[in-house]
Image (cartoon, rainbow, N blue to C red):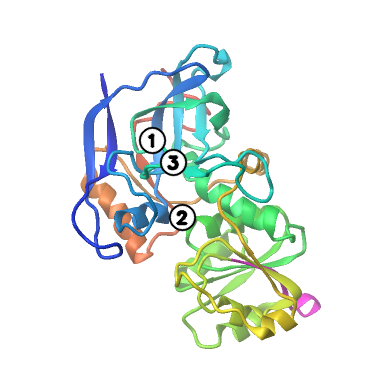
Amino acid sequence: MTTKTLTIQKVDGKPGQVYYPSSQTQHHPHPQPQPGELQIRILSAALNHRDFFLRQHLYPSPSFTTPLLADGTGLVVALGPNTSQSWLGKRVLLTPGRGWDASPSGPEERYAILGGTSTYSVGTAQEVVCISQDEVELAPEHLSAHEAAALPLVGLTGWRALVSKSGNAEAGRNVLVTGIGGGVALAVLQFAVALGMNVWVSSGSKEKIEKARGMGAKGGVCYKDEGWEKELKGLLPKERGWFDCIVDGAGGNVVSKAVKLLKPGGVIVQYGMTVSPKMDWSMAAVLNNIELRGTTMGSRQEFRDMVAFVREKQITPVVSRVVKGGLENIEAIDGLFEDIRKGSQFGKLVIEVSADEGAGTGGSKL
């Protein structure tokens, strides 16, 4: 018995110029659970910018045999020896990383992310996986399979950026979330609103700003407009006319803008640099005691805390588009990658790997 997977094909080309084709294969043996493992039928899997970078060889250690994608939810269909019977038939979220248990500083071991690289052999773009029972969480019951698949990586990254790193995850604080429309930015927006924070956003699309307002943002500005930081400053209430923190995934000129927006001692939390791999630091930032804090995905403990918060607050991740037809629908899946290329998505891009007969129930019929 074999299982379908989605991988990338190796072709000649330099990093940043090559674009590896996607390939669906059926010759992988059906994985069998080992002691302490769950056999999981993947229901839905979601894309991240990381997957797009892998296709361009702009991410370390691309693999042409490891299935793509780090985000996924699935149904536990079989158990290995010495595995808790309580998992059987449950819908679960796969933790997207390995090697980071609970340290607030960073991974205790070499950190590996699921999907598409030689550092870890499992990706969520495959029909069946076997995973340790310690590396899953019960999917929040209010989420469909597509919504649940949209949560893990961006939810963990956004949670660490806002809650663990910003020092400002409190009701009444002002936060600017840049690049709204991306998965991490939307997760930060949802977490911040649920915490009672005042959220403003920036985007290159006024339509995306209006959608964010519908999700609880106080307002926003288009970063393509000249002097957008002055416009944004004018939107703040007189009684609290500054930002406590900025959560940013773009980089670029964020520091020069931040010194005009942040309070003295304000914090920039940086989880990505889509504009450029480098940023300028200025004496103005030093004199204003601005803090720049880099952040990545997060620990197993942070993942557990994030999922519990989503369940408690009944937060629903934003799904931009879903492709059905399984992993063999390569043309449609490639269309999702084109959405990333164009930046047209608002929320996560999801592949329905297999049908979920029990959508929205936290389980499924076997």
The Cα atoms of the two marked residues, 3 and 2, are separated by 20 Å
Q: Is residue 341 a member of the stretch shown in magenta?
A: no
Give the residue displayed 72% in from the left and 54% down from the top.
195
Query: How would you rate the neighbour count of disc 2 (Cα within 10 Å): few for under 14, some for 14-19, many for 20 or more?
Result: many
The Cα atoms of the two marked residues, 1 and 3, are separated by 7 Å
The answer to which of 37 and 151 lies nearer the viewer is 37
Task: Specify start and end residues of the magenta stretch as a single range.
Answer: 237-247
Q: Which amino acid is tagged 1?
A: Ser
Q: Is residue 301 left or right of residue 147?
A: right
Image position of 88 with respect to 165: above or below? above
Instruction: Tell me which numbered mark, 1 or 3, is placed earlier along the sequence.
Output: 3
Percent coordinates x, y for residue 49 in the rendering: 41, 56
Q: Is residue 238 a member of the stretch shown in magenta?
A: yes
Helix, strand, or loop for circle 3? loop
Are dots 1 and 3 in contact, CB under 8 Å? no
Helix, strand, or loop for circle 2? loop
Percent coordinates x, y for residue 39 in the rendering: 43, 22
Name which quarter of the figure residue 13 lies in: bottom left
Give the residue displayed 51% in from the left and 34% down from the top.
93
| Residue 40 in sight here | yes
Query: How would you rate the neighbour count of disc 3 (Cα within 10 Å): few for under 14, some for 14-19, many for 20 or more?
Result: many
Q: Is residue 322 left or right of residue 242?
A: left
Q: Is residue 179 left or right of residue 315?
A: left
The answer to which of 299 and 311 lies nearer the viewer is 299
- Give the residue at mark 2: 347
- Give the residue at mark 1: 121
| Residue 151 in sight here | no
Helix, strand, or loop for circle 1? loop
Q: Residue furthest right?
A: 239
Give the residue displayed 39% in from the left and 38% down from the top.
123
- Give the residue at mark 3: 114
